[in-house]
Structure formats: C-alpha cells, structure tokens
Image (cartoon, rainbow, N blue to C red):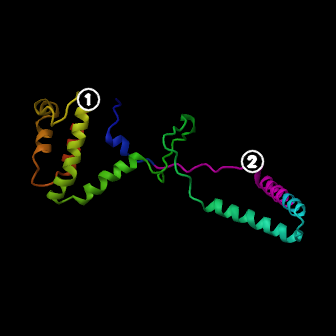
C-alpha cells in the first residue's frame, strides 16, 4: 500500500503546454500528398466511368474530388477525440507528465462525487447527516474490510477499537452541526490511518 495522502492526490501544479507536433515533410510534403491523393482518385473515377460507358467533364470531376477532400479535412478537424478504450493500458513510455484535465477519469469523478455534496451540505446538519456521513461510514467500512477483514456491522467491538473513540462517535452519532473543514481533515486523517 502506498503512503500517498489525499492532499498529495488533490494538489495542483501548473500544466505545461503541449509541444507542437510537426508533420512529416512539412507543409509542402502535405500539399504534395494531398495532390497525389486527388490525382489518384480522379484517375480511378475516370477509368471507372469510362468502363461503364459514361463521360464526365474532367474539370467537374476534379472540382468534385477536391470538394470531397476539403469536406473530409474539415470534418476531421471538427470531430471530437475518440473515447478512451476501456480496459486498455497506456504504455509507461508515452506519459509526458502533464495532466489531461479534459479527460474523464475515475479520480475526477470521485472528486466531483465528494465536492458537490460537501458544498451542498456546507451549513445544513440534516443534509450532512443524510449525504456525507453515510459516505464516510462506507469509506471506514471499506478500509476496515480491506485491512482487517471486518466492518462496523460484522464486528462492532473490534471496529470501535480500530477506529478509535473519536471516529467511532463521529460515524455513529450525528452531530448538531456539520464539522468544520479542519475537523473534517482530522477525520479523514484518522480514516487514512486505519
């Protein structure tokens, strides 16, 4: 088990700008490849149309193929990024050390899953007791289950000893007011010690 704390996970460092990518051959190479592609498509279309006995004006055919290439390029530029493959692993060598804030990941979902209810129940005891306290209890039960093979429900006496009186009292008896951020940080630190 690593010794990373919640503060380490949630700390923010300024994001480095992504390096600009250069295409092979520069701009002239890209133009030459595009023109070669257009010429190849035009040749295939002319041969195919003549094979079936149709004749089309060459400038009209070239204009149509150029229009198709332009539409293809615009659509590719406006397309959203592909969704991440589920279950795939990213090779360790591809990580450049920057955080992709636009990506959907489990850590961001977990942070949002805590941030919104904590903000929503900031000064309301009932909301805190009905939204946040059960989640903290689930976290405590999960830590107890992973580390000691029990939960508060299966072995309350041993769970109370492992949790400590302060954490046990906090989880079992709703307080009159929501805890301050300092108290909540102390409770999270006690949860991390389990």
Q: Relative to 124, is 180 above or below?
A: above
Q: Is 156 contained in the magenta span? A: no
Where in the figure is residue 72, as x and y percent of width and height? 69, 62
Quarter of the picture holding the C terminus: top left
Task: Write down the region rendered in magenta.
Answer: 14-42
Residue drawn 52% across the image and 45% down it: 85
Residue in view at x 54 percent, y 40 percent: 95
| Percent of width and height locating residue 91 | 55, 36
Q: Is residue 134 above or below residue 159?
A: below
Q: Is 38 part of what is drawn in magenta?
A: yes
- Residues at circles 2 and 1 in contact by the CB criterion of under 8 Å: no
Placement of 61 over or under 189, stated as above or below: below
- Can the viewer see residue 193 in this picture? no
Placement of the N terminus among the 4 image quadrants: top left
Instruction: Characterize the local packing of mark 1: few (<14), some (14-19) or many (20 or more) Cα atoms within 10 angstroms.
Output: few
Q: For this rendering, which residue is in front, 97 or 124? A: 124
Residue 97: x and y, percent?
Answer: 51, 41
Which quadrant holds residue 64?
bottom right
Q: Residue at x 51, y 37 (%)?
A: 89
In this picture, residue 80 sits left or right of residue 126: right
* SS for dot 1: helix
Where residue 27 sits, quadrant-wise, is bottom right
Q: CA distance from mark 2 to mark 1?
A: 53 Å
User: Tag 1 or tag 2, which sits nearer the N-term?
Assistant: 2
Q: Which mark is residue 147?
A: 1
Q: Which residue is mark 2?
A: 24
Residue positioned 15% across, 40% down in the render: 167
- Could you tell me which secondary element the residue under label 2 belongs to? loop
Q: Is residue 5 left or right of residue 56?
A: left
């Amino acid at each position: 088990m690593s010794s990373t704390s919640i503060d380490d996970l949630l700390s923010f460092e300024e994001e480095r700008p992504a390096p600009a990518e250069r295409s092979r051959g520069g701009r002239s190479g890209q133009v030459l490849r595009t023109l070669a592609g257009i010429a190849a498509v035009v040749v295939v279309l002319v041969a195919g149309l003549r094979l079936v006995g149709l004749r089309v004006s060459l400038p009209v055919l070239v204009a149509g193929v150029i229009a198709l290439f332009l539409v293809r390029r615009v659509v590719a530029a406006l397309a959203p990024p592909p969704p991440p493959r589920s279950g795939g692993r990213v090779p360790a060598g591809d990580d450049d050390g920057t955080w992709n804030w636009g990506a959907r990941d489990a850590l961001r979902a977990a942070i949002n899953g805590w941030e919104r209810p904590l903000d929503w129940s900031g000064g309301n005891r009932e909301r805190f007791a009905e939204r946040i306290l059960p989640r903290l209890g689930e976290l405590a039960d999960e830590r107890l289950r992973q580390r000691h093979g029990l939960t508060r429900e299966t072995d309350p006496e041993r769970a109370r000893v492992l949790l400590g009186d302060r954490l046990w009292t906090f989880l079992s008896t709703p307080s009159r007011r929501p805890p301050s951020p300092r108290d909540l940080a102390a409770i999270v630190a006690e949860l991390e010690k389990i």
